[in-house]
Amino acid sequence: MQLSHLAETLIGSEIVKLGGEIREKIRKGEKIYNFTVGDFDPAIFPIPRELEDLIIDAYRKHFTNYPAAEGNLDLRESISAFLQEREGLSYNTKEILVASGGRPLIYSLFRTLVDKGDKVIYAVPSWNNNHYTHLNQGEHVVIEAAAENNFMPTAAALQPYIREATLICLCSPQNPTGTTISKKDLSAICELVIEENKRRAESGKKLYVLYDQMYWQLTYGSIEHYNPVSLYPAMRDYTIFIDAISKAFAATGVRVGWAFGPAEIISKMNAIMSHIGSWAPMAEQKATAAFLTRKEAIDAFLKAFRAAVSERLRQIHDGFVTLKKEGFNVDVLAPEAAIYLTIKIDLAGKRTSEGTLLSDQMAVTSYLLNEAGLAVVPFSAFGAAKNSPWYRLSVGTCKLEDIPEMIGKLRAAMRKLG
């Protein structure tokens, strides 16, 4: 069977593939510590009760017809007020576009800006930038980020490639690392973008920044979230934000996301999405419009939610620090934000008690799953090198009582290796 070039060359999600293996093991009765999914167990992290009640009420009021293509006006008004209150960002309703989560918005932004052969700059590891670039036949300009900089890109790393590039993809707090871009580094990148756009002719394509801030409300301790437009107002013309209720309110399945940026770009994205039909459901839009105005309910939810997520991240971080002190070849970055922890498990080249060589990182990942019941996602699934020993660990489905047991099983599995 001959299919399109895109269909034949598109790489399926490694996370989905790993998820299939995990489900089969769980079906067979095995105890798996599943830290793979960037999602939440609703039994542990339910959506805010106020939002749930508003959704139910909206359905009972029969809000079941098509929403406005660009998102209902009341929701866009609520988002506009929410951005002003929470981030000090001023965007009107014509500069805001609503969709069923962040994915269709990112895809429509790529379709709006990127022509075949256009250069798209992104660092790895990062979530899906490689696939969106492939979907749009862009030219990949891949920056290998390093642990020394919390796996975030720097201006120095980007600078050699920005000439003639169309899009820079940034995400902070970042999926998969749970780290944030510093004010200094983001400021330097903004300066590069502004200077590059001054250099370009008025009639030519500009250099834009996709700024995915899906996790910006989930930062911990003294960590602060920064965005390009607040740092440099001139970046307003070149920045398109992606955001949603998905992560900050544990509402991944509710499917309400939004983009905001220059009105002309938002309008073109809306035109593309009008043919795809990836609208957020009417009832969920009505509920979200009301919920975003409830400051006290939001503050109370986020306070408890952040505390619960950060406690899980802290305990697992401390467990890995202990393992490292015990001499095991592991490492971990301090948790800063989101629901992710960056861990290093460097076991390639070791042999199992049966004499099997863990010849590469794929073998290590399988060993962790089979011997320790530990399911984590290698950074190679996010575009990093296949031999990278770093992993994403997600705590959205993590029970606190499982953490000591998981650390213990990991320790026992590593002790078995020669």
Image (cartoon, helix red, strand yellow):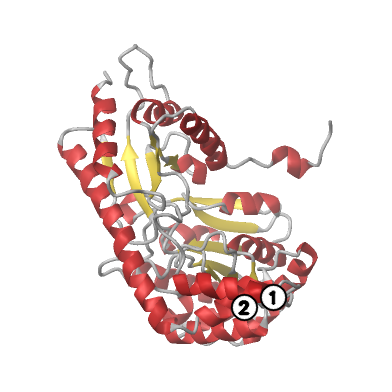
* Local crowd size for mark 1, using a 10 Å CA cut-off: few (<14), some (14–19), many (≥20): some
Coordinates of residue 379 in the picture (x, y in percent): 44, 43
Front residue of this view, candidates 225 and 415: 415
Query: Farthest residue toward the left?
Result: 325
Task: Using the image, tell me which numbered label, if any, was put on residue 355.
Answer: none
**Is residue 201 in sight in this rendering?**
no
**Label 1's element?**
loop
Distance from Cα at disc 2 to Cα at disc 1? 8 Å
**Is residue 363 in sight in this rendering?**
yes
Give the residue at mark 2.
Answer: 286
Specify the quadrant of the image occupied by residue 163.
Answer: bottom right
Residue ID at (35%, 62%): 337
Query: Farthest residue toward the right?
Result: 1
Front residue of this view, candidates 417 and 193: 417
Coordinates of residue 49 in the picture (x, y in percent): 45, 70
Give the residue at mark 1.
Answer: 63
Amino acid carrying label 1: it is Phe
Amino acid carrying label 2: it is Lys
Coordinates of residue 256 in the picture (x, y in percent): 59, 68
Query: Farthest residue toward the top?
Result: 355
Q: Is residue 190 left or right of residue 58?
A: left
Front residue of this view, candidates 106 and 181: 106
Q: Is residue 178 left or right of residue 245?
A: left
